[in-house]
Amino acid sequence: MVTLRHPVVEDAPALAAVHVRAWQEAYRGGLMPDAYLDALSIDERAAMWRDGLQRPPRPRAARFVADDERDGIVGFITVGPADGEDGADLGEVYAVNVDPDAWGRGVGRTLLAAGVDALAAAGFGTAVLWVHPDNARARRFYGRSGWAFDGAERRQEVLGVEVPEARYRRTLRR
């Protein structure tokens, strides 16, 4: 059984492990350079998470972790104003990652639903997220969850590597 909660600083190592494992599995084989993925450091990601979790979320932002009673932390989501702009009218899913061992168990759907609900509760009527255009698994997941590609594309630096991204959008419940 998976439960959601807000992360605490002590979760940083587990969040880092999920982050690294999810990226290494999801982006291998050409979506991101394999050498970059192989060099990802759980210790470095844990420091990043510790630093971020020591600060409260920005206004209208939220972050959740998914805890599995058997496996501990198996995923996370972070959401807030689009492009990190506090006054934005548009919400954004900044990141959703699930440990590959938990893929297919509904963890991603649970996290995404919580993120969408948090954005709607924060007053956003529409939200976006960015996904690698060649990440077919993620694109199917978002499509099944009510998100649709809106035609926007960009190249963005994501934690040290430049990647192409396609924007998905959806209307939120109010």
Image (cartoon, grey):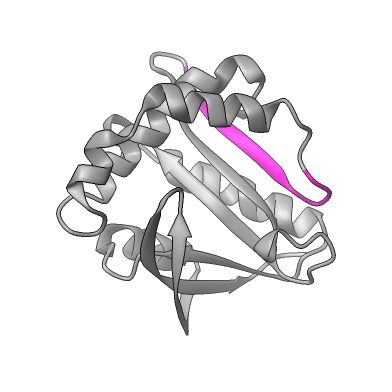
Give the image quarter of residue 169: bottom right
* Image location of residue 164, percent across then percent down: 37, 70
Horizontal side, residue 121 vs residue 165: left or right? right
Q: Is residue 62 visible?
A: yes
Q: Where 129 sits versus 2, above or below?
A: below
* Image location of residue 36, percent across then percent down: 27, 44
**Closer to the camera in the image, 44 or 152:** 44
Question: Magenta stretch: residue 66 in it?
Answer: yes
Q: Residue at x 26, y 68 (%)?
A: 134
Q: Bounds of the magenta span?
A: 58-68
Horizontal side, residue 125 vs residue 34: left or right? right
Question: Magenta stretch: residue 1 in it?
Answer: no
Given the current orientation, which residue lies at the most extreme left position? 29
Q: Where 29 sits versus 105, above or below?
A: below
* Image location of residue 59, percent across then percent down: 84, 49
* Image location of residue 37, percent across then percent down: 26, 42
Horizontal side, residue 74 vs residue 5: left or right? left
Q: Residue at x 22, y 53 (%)?
A: 33
Q: Is residue 15 visible?
A: no
Q: Residue at x 43, y 62 (%)?
A: 142
Q: Main secondary structure of the magenta part?
A: strand
Q: Residue at x 48, y 65 (%)?
A: 130
